[in-house]
Amino acid sequence: MKSKMFKKLMAAVIATTMTASLAACTGNGGESTDAQGSSSSESKPATQSSDVASSSSEEVGGYTVLKDANGNVYNLGGMEIIIRDWWSGDGTPKEPTNAFEEAQAEYWDWIQETYNFTIKQMAISDWGSAPQDFVDYVSSGGDSSNYVFTLRNDAALISAMSTGLCYDLSTIDCLDFSSQKFQANLLHKQYSKGGKIYAMYAGPSEPRTGIFFNKRLLKEAGIDPDSLYDMQKNGTWTWDAFIDLCDQVQKDNNNDGVIDVWACNANDGLLTEAAVYSNGGEFVGQDASGKYVYKLEDANTLEGLEFANKIFKNYWEKEPEDAAWDYYKNSFLDGNYVFCFDQAYCAQETGPFHDMDDDFGFVMFPKGPQKNDYTNCWDNNPACIPACYDADRAWKIAFAWNLYTNDVPGYEDSDAWKANYYNSYRDTRAVDETLTMMRSKGMITYHGVIPNMQFGPELTWVVGPFSGPISEVVSSISDTWKAYIADANK
């Protein structure tokens, strides 16, 4: 049931729109319009840049009402839009549990009523099939549904970009990629090529790779766990500081030549990546002209790879020979080592560390000698519109998605995003300091959009406790990677 406030806002919108419509009728001799601002033969939204530039808006009850160049409220004609993903269930809205969620539900109701459309998120694909489902849908010409596909970085998506299956979002003028909403994550740049934009994401990035630490084991080594947060806060959380901690915590308690408490273990590919990014390195860059650039042998990248190699060789827990790839998760839960490199979601309710007996904290990866600040590689789920939709249909879908993903009025600078993280982490500093920094201190990377590049099997799964020298690893793939990048630039 909609609240009294919502009904008042809708009444104000209708009254405002009717006034604008009457003015249009009497002043311009135009055809009559209804309370939604549409003509008797449904008005179409402006799809030319010049039309949008001359459109207008009006504030009503704290909300901004958008109107076309004729002064009419945009009308999507009752269109149903579905944002399809793999986690949102059947699309039934959840009951609000706090003031922010109530305001969000209020706002979503308002945009749908005001602009005459419905929108919902539904789990239609699964994580594994989503990219190929998109390719199959567009290749077959689509259907009557109006989808925004939530995808993930995958060879199928990269192929879709190259073969024209993703709608060029740069042609849709209701999407302003210079706005903070898009600049806060830069995903559209990651999925751009030749001046065309194939995917988007709204708002600050999800926090990603950092270091979980076992507070009990730190205390047993005579280290105050809060000192890690303090170093992070005052700018002294560096590679050297981290290595110093590793030396202090790694112990052979009974002097039998066997390490009893190890310093590190992790999702090893994430360590290799984070070490490079933390030093200002990258694997594939992009120049001002949009061309991809080979960066594997840049000095900052090689220094980062050598640092990762140092950790693998000196501080990495020795695993059983038959250990599964995710052995490190249970080993961290069991208190076998102190520092775990993994992503922030691991602490959440469905994550592996949520119910850990030992107390834990979470900090960003320490900065390397070539960086003045911490960084976090942003990795968000790209949203794509099928290229099989015509321009008018794609515009309306983008218009609705853009409104749906906007900040809730009154909560533009809100900390409401922290609520679920507070329920997951053991201390507030992990949320207020680490995760907050991760959302603003970040970068994007381009190796994931290079066709045929096998980033894990060719590099990050190779660098590890048993790998050879970094120089040999790099030389074994350098010519291949240069060829991949050259092909991508054609």
Image: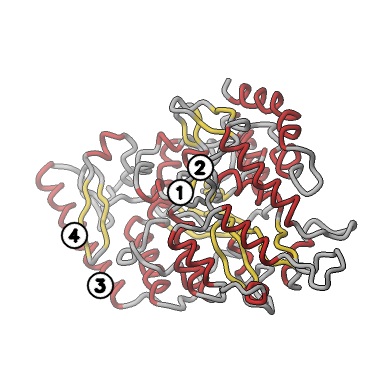
Percent across and percent down for residue 243 are: 63, 56
CA–CA distance in space, label 4 to label 3: 12 Å
Which of the two discs, 4 and 1, sits closer to the camera?
A: 1
Q: Residues within 10 Å of mark 4 (few under 14, many from 20)?
A: some
CA–CA distance in space, label 4 to label 1: 36 Å
Q: Is residue 293 above or below residue 131?
A: above
- On screen, residue 196 versus residue 270, left or right, reads left
Marks 4,3: beta carbons within 8 A: no
- On screen, residue 466 versus residue 20, left or right, reads right
Which SS class for mark 3? helix
Q: Residues within 10 Å of mark 3 (few under 14, many from 20)?
A: few
Which of the two discs, 2 and 1, sits closer to the camera?
A: 2
Q: Is residue 267 above or below residue 107?
A: above
Which SS class for mark 1? loop
Name the residue type under label 1: Asn
Upstream in sequence: badge 4 or badge 3:
3
Which SS class for mark 4? helix
Which of the two discs, 3 and 1, sits closer to the camera?
A: 1
Residue under circle 2? 370
Which SS class for mark 2? loop
- On screen, residue 293 versus residue 111, left or right, reads right
Tell me the residue at 42%/69% (across/down).
416
Q: Name the disc covering residue 8, or none.
A: 3
Tell me the residue at 58%/62% (across/down).
344
Q: Name the disc covering residue 16, or none.
A: 4
Upstream in sequence: badge 2 or badge 3:
3
Name the residue type under label 2: Gln
Residue under circle 1? 185
Q: Quadrant of residue 403?
A: bottom left
Name the residue type under label 4: Thr
CA–CA distance in space, label 4 to label 2: 57 Å
